[in-house]
Image: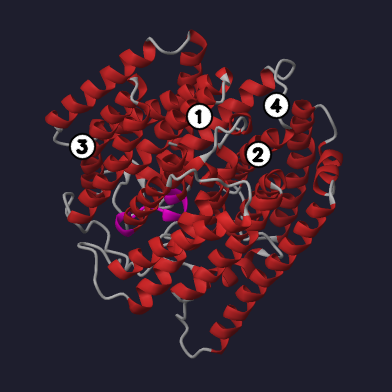
Amino acid sequence: MTRQRAPPAPGTGAPLSGSVLAEAAVVFAVVLSIHAAVLDRYSWCAVALAVQAFYVQYKWDRLLQQGSAVFQFRMSANSGLLPASMVMPLIGLVMKERCQAAGNPYFERFGIVVAATGMAVALFSSVLALGITRPVPTNTCVISGLAGCVITYIMKHSLSVGEVIEVLEVLLIFVYLNMILLYLLPRCFTPGEALLVLGGISFMLNQLIKRSLTVVESQGDPVDFLLLVVVIGMVLMGIFFSILFVFMDSGTWASSIFFHLMTCVLGLGVVLPWLHWLIRRNPLLWLLQFLFQTETRIYLLAYWSLLATFACLVVLYQNAKRSSSESKKHQASTITRKYFHLIVVATYIPGIIFDRPLLYVAATLCLAVFIFLEYVRYFRIKPLGHTLRSLLSLFLDERDSGPLILTHIYLLLGMSLPIWLVPRPCTQKGSLGGARALVPYAGVLAVGVGDTMASIFGSTMGEIRWPGTKKTFEGTMTSIFAQIISVALILIFDSEVDLNQSYAWILGSISTVSLLEAYTTQIDNLLLPLYLLILLMA
């Protein structure tokens, strides 16, 4: 969640504004840092991609200002193409390096495929923007074309035929998901957020199909299969109900009963059999055995249940406070919304320290519950649909301009992605020493601590504004200082963390991501943890 940002009017802001240039400078600093750490042909591709995305981003901004984009995007932000384009390629690069250091050739190749897929998706988005821009931006087309040729040439000689087909499959899925979801969900994403979210879903869907077809040969961890099946199952369920409720009123009792029945049918008839096929055992029995396997897990589950109850009480209290308020437009303050950041921090830190596999599974199940409740709210499914609409409307901000409320889901994703993304086989043999030992804490540091402290102190005591933004210098400095203190506390309480004198890199990574938070207009709950993960992994 962001701090103290007043939503600009749609179409305002010059394409070459100082805040956009500052955001681009921070992203280029990250790209060049990863390039210096890796320094191979793939990192040169990442630099070329960043240059072309920098130019194309302004074309997207112009399209948004003129209202000429094909789909309706979120208007209170710039296009965000540059920061979003670099996430998947950089994650692939650092994953390749870490898995190479750990001596795991399978995941080393997997990292290369992730990087190539991210570059292909970003290039497609750039071509889409350039193709509908009028007049045609000749210079930008030349730069984008040269970068595309360099990336295509290098990747053609680096990927096997099967890997090239895999990249093309993800690109095809991404194209169709864009056409379906951006049509069904207008004003929910910026172009950059759509690239990041839909690109990730496309990659996961392709991985799920691939592993389902090669289930005899693949002996993966059941928790990985659980994440893939849950995410893809919930997305497909949403698409199914969105198309269905075009032809019928979703707010009636008949539709609500049908919704619950079809949810049971899809869950018990599709999702659970699919998961059973992948893990070769009863999913429900495996899950119960996993959750209650040790005494520590029982204590953690009880503790998390108490925190969830407390979060629900906060929501109910704030709504009761609104009901008693004279103002009908009463909204929760920035500080109130940050309570949930602190609750999430209190949830994740014990899980990271004591039982990361349990945290992995619990976060996956929590994501499924959040998405399901959002479907209930969005479709006004009885008996909870209207109640959820009333309760959650108190916590809306300018980023929830579309039909969906996604900020709480983005918060969960931002905290969980550092746990989900790093292949566990590549965390062995000491390959995550030094700053890399803080990778699981990237979401806690960037969003749970940094963004929270920046919002609270920036909105209450900040006076010196960063040029072109509503963010304050005091808020950013407090964010950096709070994250440094958190790292010190992690060293005290987590005996497995050994930074190996890499304090300068950690400080630089935290400072860079804090500057990105000050200037970006994208969903920082999602973007900041990913960039901190990339820097710490490097």
Q: Nearer the viewer, residue 338 or 296?
A: 296
Residue ID at (54%, 64%): 341
Range of residues picked out in magenta: 518-528
Does residue 404 appear in this view? no
> In terms of secondary structure, where does tag 4 sit?
loop
Q: Mark 2 belongs to which amino acid?
A: Leu
Residue 220: image tag: 4
Give me the C-alpha separation between circle 3 and circle 2: 36 Å
Horizontally, residue 269 falls left or right of residue 138, namely right
Give me the C-alpha separation between circle 4 and circle 3: 41 Å
Q: Nearer the viewer, residue 287 or 463?
A: 463
Quadrant the C terminus occupies: top left
Q: Nearer the N terminus, badge 4 or badge 1?
A: 1
Q: Nearer the N terminus, badge 4 or badge 3?
A: 3
Give me the C-alpha separation between circle 1 and circle 2: 22 Å
| Magenta segment includes 489 | no
Q: Which residue is mark 3?
A: 55
Q: Position of residue 533 (x, y in %)?
A: 47, 43
Does residue 64 appear in this view? yes
Residue ID at (20%, 49%): 21
Q: Which residue is mark 2?
A: 227
335 relative to 165, above or below: below
> In terms of secondary structure, where does tag 1 sit?
helix
Q: Nearer the viewer, mark 1 or mark 2?
A: 1
Q: Mark 1 belongs to which amino acid?
A: Arg
Q: Which residue is mark 1?
A: 98
Give me the C-alpha separation between circle 4 and circle 1: 19 Å
Residue ID at (63%, 33%): 424
Give me the C-alpha separation between circle 2 and circle 4: 12 Å
